[in-house]
Amino acid sequence: MLRAPTYWLRGTIAELVPQRRRAELCPQIGKPLAAYTRADHARMAAATPCVLNAAAVGEVDVLRVHVRVDSWETPWSHQNRPPGWLFRGQFLDQTLHKGMVIDMDASWLEPCEAGS
């Protein structure tokens, strides 16, 4: 059986930061998610939190997490799909290195099974 590789970033939570932010309209990229470039992904991430309609614009509570990078596995070729958030040793537009701290929206995290 063949399986597609899984790319990941493993780290430890250095800090949880509850914040109140203004959610503006999401950027209109004008192409399907599968066609996003790394710059498109970074633009969307920078706009988080954002809303899809003007009536929803306003202040929202968000939880930011500071993750200290321990290790990662990123793709180095496109492998029939465009680059995502993890690509060629980078998270969005930041070059990964052990010990760096990434500030991100907590909703971006996914749990991993113990030992994986």
Image (spheres, rainbow, N blue to C red):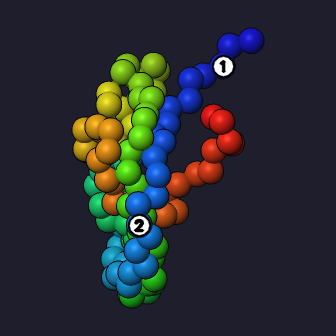
Q: Amino acid at mark 1?
A: Arg
Using the image, determine if residue 9 lies above or below residue 81.
Answer: below
Asked if one can make out residue 29 in the rendered structure from this viewpoint, the answer is no
Q: Nearer the viewer, residue 57 or 18?
A: 18
Label ID, residue 15: 2
Asked if one can make out residue 3 in the rendered structure from this viewpoint, the answer is yes
Farthest top residue in view: 1
- Residue 33: x and y in percent read 45, 45
Q: Mark 1 — residue? A: 3
Residue ID at (47%, 52%): 12
Residue ID at (50%, 32%): 7
Q: In the image, 102: left or right of 109?
A: left
Using the image, determine if residue 68 lies above or below residue 38.
Answer: below
- Residue 103: x and y in percent read 34, 60
Identify the secondary structure beneath mark 2: strand
Residue ID at (32%, 45%): 99
Farthest right residue in view: 1
- Residue 2: x and y in percent read 68, 13
Q: Nearer the viewer, residue 115 or 6?
A: 115
Res 49 quadrant in image: bottom left
Q: CA distance from mark 1 to mark 2?
A: 35 Å
Q: Amino acid at mark 2?
A: Glu
